[in-house]
Image (cartoon, helix red, strand yellow):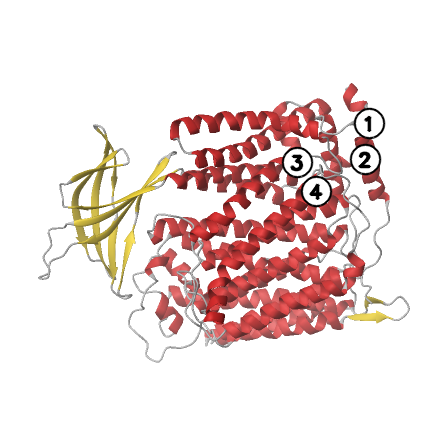
Amino acid sequence: MTDVIVFCVLLVALAAFVAGPLYATRVPPASGGREDTPDGTRAAVSDLEIDHASGLIDDQQYGEELADLQARVTRPSDGPTHSTD
Amino acid sequence: MLGRGLLGVAIAFAGYALIAAPASLRRDPRSKRWIVARPELLASARRALIAVAVATAGASVRLWIAFFTRDFSIDYVAMNTSRSAAPWYTFSAFWAGMAGSLLLWSLVLSVYAAVFVIQRRSRDVARDAFVPWAIPVLAGAELFYLSLTFGPENPFAATDVVPFDGRGLNPLLHSPGMLIHPPMLYTGLIGLIVPFAIAVSALVTKRTDADWIRLVRRWTLVPWLALGCGLVLGGAWAYTELGWGGYWGWDPVENAAFMPWLAATAFLHSAMVQERRGMLKVWNVFLVVTSASLATFGAFLTRSGLLSSVHTFAESPIGKWFFVFLAAQAVGGIALLAWRLPHLRTPVAFGSPVSKEAAFLVNNLVFISAAAVVLWGTVLPLASEAVTGEQIAVGPPFFNRVLAPIGALLLLLSAFGTVVPWRRGSLVRVASRLAWPAAIATAVAAAILVTSQRGSFAGLVWIAMLLATTSVLEIARAARARSKLAGLSISGATRDLFARNPRRFGGYVVHLGVAIMVIGFAGSLGRTQTEIVARPGDSFAFAGYTFTYERLERSAPADKDVNLAVLELSRGDRRVATLRPQLNFHRNWDQPQSEIAIRTTPTSDLYVILAGIDESADGTSDDEAIFRIHHNPLVVWVWAGAIVALLGGLIALLVRTRRDVSAPAPAPGQLQRA
């Protein structure tokens, strides 16, 4: 009997939880979406500084790669998402 | 039955998510793009995946309750535990058989899927490319595994006659390692389905860009780490329980878990190339599909009964279903990749062979070659039997002979890849960075060669030391550079480094751990063993120690007959330890089982097995015993290296990149002047 009660309670609770958005009057607003500066680029800049400061790359290469990374941050995103052919 | 009912509920919600997520999308005829036309339906599909996790967890809790209340009306409980079982072995009995292990597999998968949708919930629903298409893939996988658990491998099936006591846990599973090894392995293997789902989403939406690679890398790191832990824990279990003196036997099921780990390791390296240089997109998707397919292949091998191993479950009818699922996953993934190939090609070319990207590419090819060798050695017995009717046995000598040079090459590449910069490097600079590590490695290897007279051992230590010292010195160099740049102390600069780029420096710690493990593996070249027949009071010498067989103690607890030999161990005049190997007979399983006694020191293990007790025909005994003793050098280095590698992996996974790194970087030349 306990099993049946637990089953029914869980079933109703889960069904209500899943169906909730279908009956909501308002869809949750979109959040900020994309991050401002991605962690990967931040880490890459940090990498570059260390490689330069420890003598692994020269000034010229440092300048080129830094410009490349900065350009990547300011480049527009690859656009909205769900395109298919 | 509550448990089976909840599994049915989980299946229903998985089916709903499978349909609802794609149904929330609409193709916009003008832009020819899929847009989220019904966000409320997509939100409901996300919640359905959470509901699957809750229902599966509920079913799992129900099974655990049945174990702890000794509900022997459930066949699975009666077959895998007994009244005398300790609480922790009652807990681990959950995954002792096929049905429970599949339920655990489903539970882990459903938790992954739920965490994925929860983690992505704060994203803009309309712009998040990955969720709408990942949900059906995850739900499809859940549907498959839950259906197996609901149908042919039902852990809640009732017994015909309820016994007073259960059979008890398989004696081989009476190990603390079994509490964590299977869950860890499953967390690794099934977790690779999440990157696969993200890859499918990315291919459908043509979004194999920086967002994709960051997301999929993070979701690969978790199962990769868990799989690595699972493999090492499996080795520790084999070492302490199976009684053959080693920790890795190239068993087909060990191989089946090792292959996806190799492919995932390759991906974690090549992902950096795409993140940093925008290259290898096709290769990266291929590796993600391959890793997940190899993980499913491993499950197929383990559960189909095709291969015989201490790890496999008995032959089962679910093998053919696994094969269908595996084919759908692998063929579907590769077909999707082929379809999107024109969109994945990148115009970026390799600048120089002396660059990190070139080193990583070669490293990837070597990793995949290693996986291919393991795959070949694993399936060859099956293939040969299918073709010729005779099974060709492929044993450790084949794997060791072929994979040892591949492993050595990987270590050398790891050392090279650590000191070479992105884009292009100078051979002179790279050579100067490797000079100190090579000098230290040479000094250590020369000392070992002189003392041990074993060239192969010294050679392996040289390679491992090269990688270890390269990793440590690069961290030290970077800390010194950071200290100068930011005016920090060396310890503060080191902490700062790990906070700024946890992946790079966590990776170096992983390399250090691997190098330590390789020194442990090299120790296996110096293994020795002996077999001694002794009576109480006898003494014998082995590996520089004197063993004195004191007595045999017999007892009979609830489910087994215990024979415990007491051995005093001394070195010279000094008594150093008492060893207590056991040979037990498990009555319910009608099988003997050795409990090994191990004495561990930093340089070697003494591994003592009580292999037999002489009994005369009339049942009397003078307690004469057969001991098999192994002297295994440097085994503890394997476990220590694994802990260091785990620490590095956790750093890469858990430490969040510091946000202030985006501050304007110094101009070229400024750093030199500073």
Report, in whole angstroms, how far the alpha carbon at label 3 lies from the one at label 1. 24 Å
Q: Chain of mark 4?
A: B
* Mark 2 and mark 4 on one chain: no
2 or 4: mark nearer the eye: 4
Q: The disc labelled 1 sits on which kind of residue?
A: Pro
| Badge 2 element | helix
Amino acid type for the residue under numbered disc 2: Leu
Callouts 3 and 1 on one subunit: yes
Q: Chain of mark 1?
A: B
**Residue located beneath label 1 in the image:** B668
The reply to whether discs 2 and 1 touch (Cβ–Cβ < 8 Å) is yes
Q: Nearer the viewer, residue B341 or B222?
A: B341
Residue bearing the label numbered 2: A66
Residue B191's label in the rendered image is: none
Mark 1 crowdedness (10 Å alpha carbons): few <14, some 14-19, many ≥20? some
Q: Are marks 2 and 3 in contact (CB under 8 Å)?
A: no
Residue B559, image x and y in percent? Answer: 25, 62
User: Mark 2 to mark 1: distance in Å?
Assistant: 9 Å
At label 4, the amino acid type is Ala
Q: CA distance from mark 1 to mark 4?
A: 25 Å
Q: Establish if B344 lies above or below B330.
A: above
Residue on which the image places disc 3: B499
Q: Which mark is residue B358?
A: 4
Q: Position of residue B423 (x, y in %)?
A: 76, 38
Decide which of tag 3 and tag 1 comes sooner along the chain: 3
Q: Position of residue B431 (x, y in %)?
A: 65, 28
In this view of the protein, can residue B653 be seen by the observer? yes
